[in-house]
Each structure stands twice: as C-alpha cells, then as structure tokens.
Image: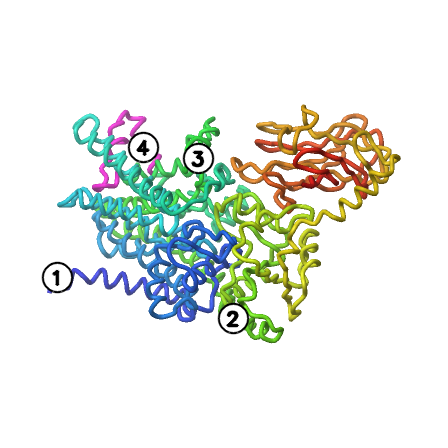
Amino acid sequence: MKRLRSYVPYVILLGLGIWILDASFGRVIHYANDYFFGDSEDAYKNYFIPAYYLKYDSGTHFSGMNYPYGEHVVFTDNQPLISWGLKVVQNIVPISDYVPAIFNWLMIFSLLGAMWWMFLILRQMKLPDWYAIPMAILISTLTPQLHRFVGHYALAYAFLIPMLWYALLRHAQAQRPWLSLVIIIGMISLFAFLHVYHLLMGALFGSAFFLVKACGHWRKNRLQFWKELGISAMVFVLPVLIFQVFMAMTDSVPDRPSFPYGFFEFRATLGSVFLPVMGPFWEAWNRFFHHKMAAIEAFSYVGLTATIVGVLTLIRAANYAWRGFYGRILSPAFPKGMKSSLGAGLLVLFFSMGIPFIWGLEFLPEHLGPLRQFRSLGRFAWVFYYVFTAYSAWYMYLIFRRIRQKGLITFAYGVLIVGMVFWFWESAIQLQTHVASIKEQRGTNALKHDQTDYQAIMDSIGVQVDDFQAILPIPAYHMTSDKFVPRFLTKPILTRSFKLSYETGLPLMGGVMSRTSIGHTKKLIQVLSNKRVHKEILADLPNQKPILILRQDKTPITLSQQRVVHRAKLLYTGPGFSFLQMDLDQLEADTEETKRRFDVIQADSSLRWNEFLVHPVPKWMYTDRFDKQPNSEFGQEYLYAEKGPLMIFSGSIPANRKMHVSVWLKIDPRVAGFPVMFYKEFDSEGKEVFKKDFPSMFGNEIYGDWQLIEGTFQSKQADHRIELVFEGEKIAVESLIIKPNGTEVFLPLEGKHEMMFNNYYIE
C-alpha cells in the first residue's frame, strides 16, 4: 500500500498535464494531421522533408531537394533520430502521410515530458509534492521552446534539457558512476540527431556542471578537483567527437558555409531573459520604457516571479558583501546539486550573450572551427531558463517556509500564492497565445489538403512522371547556403512544389535547408543564369531526361526566371499553376547570336572605343578590369579588400542619362551573405543627396566563383560626384563596366575566353 501511495504524485502530475494540454490544444491533438503549425518556409519544409524521406529515402541521404546532389539528413531538419525510427515502421506500414500528425504530437507531448523531469528535479531539491507538481507544470508551460512550435520543430522538445539535468543531478548519487557518465555522454550524443544545437547545448551544460563541481573541490580535495575536471572535459569532448566522426564518415561535402550570419546578432540579453516578451506585462513595460523587443532567437523569459527572485538574490548577495560575509555568497546553503546547476546555467547564459566574444574578441569565432556554425547564441539561454526557474521555485518555497516559521501562516501562504498566480498568468498567456496561432492553421497541411490530382493532370496531357528527372519550381528558391536569398518566394509555390514532389517522387531543383554546399547552390542558381553562361550542372545530371517546370501563376518572377520560362515548352495551364518542359539542350550555353553580332560590329571601324567595340559609341563610358597584367584571364587578378568600404568608382558622369553598371563579385564561403554595392551621389558641396543599394543576395548570374552585380542609376546633375562603393568583408571584385543603358560592349580576348560581351565572358 505504501508503495502504491508513492505513485500517486506521478499519477496526479500526468493527469493534470494531460488535462491541461487537452484543454489547451483540444482539436489540434484530436485532428493533428490537419495542421501545419507554422506559416513560414521553415515550417513547410520541416514537414515535407521527413515525409519525403520516409516515402523515398533511407540512411543518411535526403534526395528530395538540391537535385541532383541531395543533402545529408543532419542538415535538413529531418530529425534523423526520429525519422530513422519511423522508417522502420514505414517499411512495415506506410505512415509517411501522417508525418504532420506525428511531429505535432511529439511537440505537444514534449511539454508533458518536461513536466515529468522538472517534477523529479524539484523533488531532488526536497520540495513537497503539493508544491512541486504545479511548479513543474508552470515551468514547462512558460518554456521559451514554445516559441519554436511555429517552425523550428526539432528545437521544440522541451523535455531534453530537464532530462539531461536530472541525469547530472543523479550522477553524484549513482552506485555506478561510470555507467551514469556513459548514459550522460550517450544522451548528449543522441541529442545531435534531433538537432545539432541540442548537442552543443547539452555538451556545454554538462561540461559546465562538472566544471563548477570541480572548482568547489579546489581547496579541499585536489584529487577530486582533477577528477571532476576530467569528467567536465569528457562530457564536452566525447559527444562532439562522436558526432564529428560520424559526419566525417557520412558527409563528403567540403564547402559548407563556414561562418553563417547571426553569431553576434542573435544573442540573448538581460532584457530577453528577465523582461516580458509578450502579453500585458510586455505592453505595460513598453508603454513606460519603450523597450525594444528582442528577436525570437533570444527569447528565454523566466517570468516576472523569477525576475523578482533574481532581484532579491542580488540584494541578498550585496548585503552579504557589505557585511563582509563573502563565504555565504560563494557557498550558499543550496540543495545538493543546485550550486553546480546554477553555476553551469550562468556560464551557459554568458555564452548565449556572446561573452567573452563581445569584449573585443569578435575575431575569435573565426578560429573556433565548428563552434562558429552555431549562429543563434540566444538559444543556449534555454539552459539557464530551466535552472533559474527551478531555483526560483525553491527560493519562493524558502521564503514561504521562513515566514511560516515565524507564525505568519496566512501571510506565508499569501506570498506563495501571489507568486504562483503571476507565474500561472504568464504561463497561461504564452500557452494560449501560441495555441491560438496554431489553431488558425487548421487545414494548412498541404500534403493532405491540396486536392489537385497531379497524376491525373499528367495523364491528360500524355506525360508520365518517369519522363522527367526533377522539378524546377518557378519562382525559384534556394535558401540553403546562408548566402543567396530568393526573390518573390511565396507560400503557394512552396506548398504546391512540396506536394507535387511528395506525390510524384520527383526531387526539387532548389532547397530550403541549412549549410548546404555553396558549390551545389551556385550550380543550381546558374540554371537561371544568362543563356551565354555555361551551366556546370549539366555535367552532374544523371540522365538526359527533361526537367518539369512548375510555374506558379500570378506571381512575379525575376527577368532571369522569365527567360527560363520562355525557353521551355508549355504542357499544361491550370488553376493557379502551369507545367512546362525544359529540355536539357535549352540549358546549353548559346553564344552563336552573340558571336554573329560581334562579327558585324568588328567589321565597322567607327565602333571602336579604346580597346573595346561599342554600339552605339557613347560620349562617356567607364571600364576597369582591375588587372595589372595586360592579358590576365578573368578572375586571375582582381581588386580586394579584407573589409569595406571598397571604392570601385568615384567621379562625374553625364546627367539625365540612365546608366547601367555591372561588376563581378567573388562568392566567398568564409563570410555570411555578400558585400553590398552602394551608389552614392554628392552635390557640389560634398553633401550626399541620394543613395541606392544593389543587393547581392538576389543575384542569378553565376560564373564559376563569381556573381554579377548589376543595375541602373541616373545622375541628377553633371557636376555631382558619383561613388560606387562596396560595404562588407572579404570583398573581391572583377571587371567593372559603367555604360549608357542599352549600349553593347565587346572586348576581343585571347586564351580561355574568346570575347567579353556586356561583362559576360564567352568561352
């Protein structure tokens, strides 16, 4: 009977947790396959990728995007640990159609798992069940990982950090410490195969936990100090090493982006941790202090009650310092394991804030190897969230108990209830806000609710799926390498192309993934390049079958994409979309017309402008190949600056004449994004009167390692000074031409290139 009674708190916790989740999510749980939780490209692809993988792929390779190269599952948000398990089931019973429901349930019930582990942790802190149960629920429903339900599903599993923390706390009590350590290291290693951020998050937390424990033994027990320090190193190094070895054995891509954007931008701050991020408290705070809301990547708000606990803790520490009781600050009377946990949480919090990198060490991440891949440092503050909210729950109970010991029982319960009510209020607001957003997404499962019968359409026009080798969606998208960004990307083209690919098994010549090979991305974008550019991807295609173009109608597309559509053969026009057939010979470089035009102009001696052939001959034109050697090949010599501004032109140009500028910019994998070219116009007094940028990230003109940046501008007055300048890092530019718009410019060449035409180098 006594043993059965010991299970009662767990039954109550699970019962309350399930009731709260069912009351909150309701029909979302019951009809989970009707929902895409988010309304972004990340949300859509994080359902499509595992569904396509289960239906068509296996092992470590995902073939549904980035055709013909595919991608390693770790870089697809495929949640390999789950997908591998589901693949076993898929081989017995087809379940790929239910991937949205499966992943939706996993996210929702991860909150129940968080409640379970937080309850065990609070019990470790000797808190009574009647208090630990509601506090575990409140901590779990206020979790910042709820913000990930709208798109970053692999990061939404709220139980992972509490589960690891509980394992760390239990290690000191384990009868077989080595087995406990193996479990901890194995647990962190497995986290990587949900999302790599979980790997580093767990490794940092575990390592910091044992590091703080080691520091506590420095004076008293040097042997124990070195033992804990060794464990700290093992807990960090071994999981990371296991993952690195696995990737080295299974991933052959050598040119993934080495330093993605955001390392210093997506940091946590004191405001993002201790100030409200939504709801009435945020509105009240913002009304008085006009506080700028942090980016969602930095959200780790601990709640108003926990913030007050933090203030009280600082006041108490300051009081001890004022009285000279420094030992009480460094060695407080915490429950067993809390000192190491809080110290570890603070260390990880500092890292999430960019400390020490922001203290004049901005250059350091460039030399930290794989660590620089983790651009969203704010996510690491989640570790601090769980540790500090548990500490706050313990501190609240400590205050309650001390007040009660003084005989003020009613007041003690009043203080405790007020703290819990505020906590409940914020938790309820956050949970219901996100649930309301999710409920609005009913019927958005494109894999289920897109009723278009693509197979029937193909039958009606006399083509089969096997007639094609891949799908090229237009508007094209290639959000894969953290450098290029598609223009005119819309929800319809994403959902329709995902559904078409999933139904037919034809992979997509595009992608929405992470850290994809820059070389592969360049070749895919080059499909959209000028017809004079040789398409390198042709040599990599496995067969000569044509490409099926899916054109989303009534959606603007770039000029380069219009040229692709015009060269293709129309197969079908339906409600909202069209099918076109692109034969591979249409992708071959076509330079015959350019060469014929060159022969005509070359024969007319009046069309010479210095070493160039120009039609019509302009009154003013400017060129600079940035070459020191007269016969240097394209890309052999160029103008370079480690950091901008890099001036490529400064002077006056004819007024009231539209000018066209083009310059080649090197695609450097060492930096995120691209440098940006600016047009600046200054009046006779040197005052800037106009500024315009030419974004590099939208470019489609790719030649080798170079991308053409081009656009038009018009000077307002002839006496105005014009500047063309690049801002950014590691800027390399080649072959600048500024000419009147519509002018043809030829340059005869020797060697690899036969000629240059309007800054295109013809082989």
Name the element at disc 2. Answer: helix
- Residue under the image location 51 percent in, 69 percent down: 443
Q: Are marks 1 and 4 in contact (CB under 8 Å)?
A: no
Numbered disc in front, either 1 or 4: 1
Q: Are marks 4 and 2 in contact (CB under 8 Å)?
A: no
Residue linked to disc 1 = 3
- Return the x and y of residue 663 as percentages of the image width and height: 69, 36
Numbered disc in front, either 4 or 2: 2
Nearer the observer, 402 or 701: 701
> Mark 2 and mark 3: span between their CA atoms?
43 Å
- Residue under the image location 62 percent in, 73 percent down: 461
- Return the x and y of residue 503 as percentages of the image width and height: 50, 68
User: Which quarter of the picture shows residue 614?
Assistant: top right
Q: Earlier in the sequence, mark 4 or mark 3?
A: 4
Q: Earlier in the sequence, mark 4 or mark 2?
A: 4
Q: Label 1 sits on what residue type?
A: Arg
Give the label on residue 354, or none.
3
Magenta residue span = 313-339
Numbered disc in front, either 4 or 3: 3
Q: Quadrant of the N terminus?
A: bottom left
On whether residue 515 falls in the magenta region, the answer is no
> Mark 4 and mark 2: span between their CA atoms?
58 Å
Q: Is residue 147 visible?
A: no
Q: Are marks 2 and 3 in contact (CB under 8 Å)?
A: no
> Mark 1 and mark 2: span between their CA atoms?
50 Å
Name the element at disc 3. Answer: loop
